[in-house]
Image (cartoon, helix red, strand yellow):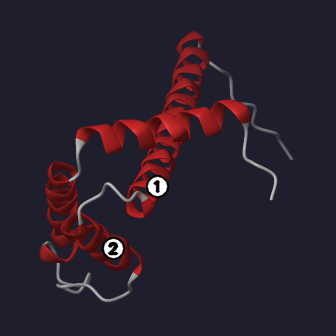
Amino acid sequence: MKRVVWKREAGDAHHSCSKNLCRIYSHSMLMRAFRRVRQEIKVYRLVLIDPRTPRKAKWLLRFVFVYILSPIDLTPDFVPILGCLDEIILLPGLLLIVRRLIPEEVITDCRGRVKAELATGPEAG
C-alpha cells in the first residue's frame, strides 16, 4: 500500500498563518465587544438605582432589560428578515431615547463607578 504525502508549498505556510491571525483577531474583537456590553449593562444597572434618574428613563430602561431577556418578540424570529430587525432597530433606538432622558452627570458617575470597580476587582460579598 502506497502512502500519499502532501507537500506544503511555500505559500501554504503564509496562508495558514494569516488564517490563524484572522481567527485570533476576530476572537479578540469579540471578547472586547463582550466586555464592553457587560460594562454597559453594569452602568445601566447603576443608572436604574440612582435617585437622580428620571422615572420615565427608569421605566423605559426596565422595559428594555425585560425585552432583551424575554423569549417573546414583537416579530417572531422565524420571519425571514423582520425577525431580527426588531432587535437590531428597536433596542438601540430605545437605548438612545433612554440615554437622552438620563442626565449626563448620572451616566458619567455610573461609568466612573464601573471603571473603579474593574480597576480594584469585584467586591467580596
Label 1 – label 2 distance at C-alpha: 12 Å
Residue 62, disc: 2
The amino acid type, in three-letter code, at marker 1 is: Leu
Q: Which residue is mark 1?
A: 46
Identified at 52% across, 21% down, the residue is: 18
The amino acid type, in three-letter code, at marker 2 is: Arg
Instruction: State which quadrant residue 77 falls in.
Output: bottom left
Please, what secondary structure does the residue beneath circle 1 have? helix
Q: Position of residue 7 (x, y in %)?
A: 68, 22
Q: Position of residue 109 (x, y in %)?
A: 42, 38
Mark before the other along the chain sequence, 1 or 2: 1
Q: Position of residue 6 (x, y in %)?
A: 69, 30
Characterize the local packing of mark 2: few (<14), some (14-19) or many (20 or more) Cα atoms within 10 angstroms.
some
Which is more toward the observer, 68 or 84? 68
Q: Position of residue 55 (x, y in %)?
A: 24, 69
Characterize the local packing of mark 1: few (<14), some (14-19) or many (20 or more) Cα atoms within 10 angstroms.
some
Q: Is residue 96 above or below residue 13?
A: below
Which is more toward the observer, 58 or 39? 58
Identified at 18% across, 85% down, the residue is: 74
Q: Is residue 125 above or below residue 9?
A: below
Horizontal side, residue 1 vs residue 98: left or right: right
Please, what secondary structure does the residue beneath circle 2 have? helix
Which is more toward the observer, 94 or 102? 102
Toward the front, the furthest residue is 51
